[in-house]
Amino acid sequence: MGDFTIRDAQAKDMVRVLQLINELAVFEKEDNAVEVSADDLVRDGFGEKKLFHCFVAESNEKIEGMALVYPRYSTWKGPTVHLEDLIVTEKMRGSGLGTALLNQVVSYGHGLGVKRINWEVLDWNEPAINFYEAKGANVMRDWDVVHLDEQGIQNYLNNLK
């Protein structure tokens, strides 16, 4: 593997993690979609009620990648882990850093005894799809992601009868 280390994130890393999240949003053509702040990440990842676990990848003492996971529950499988984002800076892609982060996530999930680790990938992101498939992941192209955003939730509630 390359010249980097993978470690558990610390609260002080969340400013850099947010920069990576924003970099991903630009890559995914959602430049203005990120609403979370570094303070939100600190509160939600390191506060009284920890909502996620984050790993960071450092190269030359700079965070160049991250993976953020949180627990879920499958009515079919039981405990699972959801990988919300695995982000590697453009300059570090192809260095093995993404593989090291994914290895860490899979090891983490295995250590928790989960039955499944799941995540989404954009259908046009062929390099990521190829990467995940090469690692043995099943990219389920016949499933669609469904969500209600904040406005959708409000509209839904406003239309209850």
Image (cartoon, helix red, strand yellow):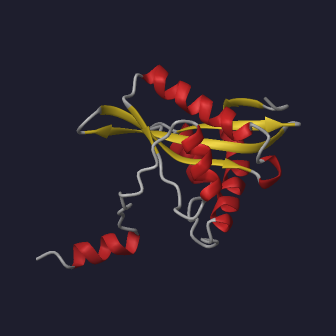
Answer with the quarter of the image where residue 36 lies: bottom right
Name the residue located 78 percent from the left edge and 54 percent from the top edge. Answer: 90
| Residue 146 placement (x, y as % from top left) | 35, 63
Name the residue located 62 percent from the left edge and 45 percent from the top edge. Answer: 131
Answer with the quarter of the image where residue 42 lies: top right
User: Toward the viewer: 38 or 129?
Assistant: 129
Name the residue located 67 percent from the left edge and 46 percent from the top edge. Answer: 14
The N terminus: image quadrant: top right
- The correct choice, above or below, for 111 with respect to 124 in the image is above
Q: Is residue 9 visible?
A: no
- The correct choice, above or below, for 101 with respect to 14 in the image is above
- The correct choice, above or below, for 130 with respect to 32 in the image is above
Left or right of 100? Residue 54 is left
User: Toward the viewer: 12 or 124?
Assistant: 124
Report the residue that reaches farthest toward the left: 161
| Residue 29 placement (x, y as % from top left) | 62, 71
Report the residue that reaches farthest toward the right: 60
| Residue 53 placement (x, y as % from top left) | 54, 36
User: Toward the viewer: 114 or 33?
Assistant: 114
The C terminus: image quadrant: bottom left
| Residue 25 placement (x, y as % from top left) | 63, 64
Name the residue located 66 percent from the left edge and 49 percent from the top edge. Answer: 87
Q: Is residue 97 visible?
A: yes
